[in-house]
Image (spheres, rainbow, N blue to C red):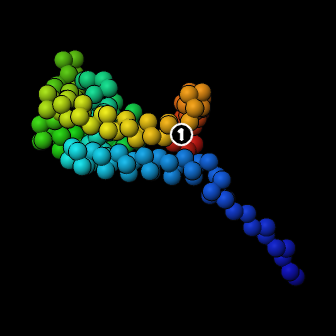
Amino acid sequence: MKSSPVTRRVIKLGSYWPYQLTVLADRISRHTAAIVKQHGQLNLSQWRVMAAIAEQSGRTAAEVVTITPMDKGIVSRATKAMLAAGLVRREASQGDGRVSHLFLTEQGETLYQALMPRVEAVAQEIHASLSADEQRRFGAFLGRLVSTMSETPGS
């Protein structure tokens, strides 16, 4: 007895938007990593931690983990390296001594201010290919997609 042939389906990666978004994110990450390495001797994880602290001074490592696509081990290693380099300082929480808050040092703030325009230029290069209305809509679409997708499968 012959079994019926299974119809083989494939995803066409060139037109599959989740794959295209992954490619775009990877390219942005590679450009950003090259910039922060060349101009700041940081790796991408260190830059992400720095940017999270610059955005809101006093964040905890747990808060950095929550807002960045990195696990706590990566955030811990990046923070440790930046503490050793004098770019970040740590202060124990007034309310809970087990928690510490992270702050950029003067040296860290100076480096962040030097790197930020170069990193922003990566996004501006992409935005330049879109009209002002497309830029606004793109931002709105991304925000909606991010909020729609749960962080982990099954949650």
The residue that appears at 23% across and 34% down in the rendered structure is 114
Question: Few, some or many C-alpha atoms within 10 Å of disc 1 (few <14, some 14-19, many ≥20)?
Answer: few
Number of numbered discs on residues: 1
Residue 154 in the image, given as x and y percentages of width and height: 57, 42
Closest to the observer, 97 or 102:
102
The residue that appears at 20% across and 35% down in the rendered structure is 111
Residue 83 in the image, given as x and y percentages of width and height: 15, 38
* Residue 3 falls left or right of residue 37: right
Residue 78 higher or lower than 97, as above or below: below
Residue 98 visible here: no
* Residue 43 falls left or right of residue 87: right
Outermost residue on the bottom side: it is 1
Q: Quadrant of the C terminus?
A: top right
What amino acid is found at the position of numbered circle 1 in the picture?
Ser
Outermost residue on the right side: it is 1
Residue 116 in the image, given as x and y percentages of width and height: 30, 34
Closest to the observer, 41 or 77:
41
The residue that appears at 44% across and 36% down in the rendered structure is 124
- What secondary structure is found at the residue carrying circle 1? loop
Q: Quadrant of residue 137?
A: top right
* Residue 77 falls left or right of residue 69: left
Outermost residue on the top side: it is 95
The residue that appears at 34% across and 39% down in the rendered structure is 119
User: Label 1: which residue?
Assistant: 129
Residue 69 visible here: yes
Q: Quadrant of the N terminus?
A: bottom right
Residue 147 in the image, given as x and y percentages of width and height: 55, 31
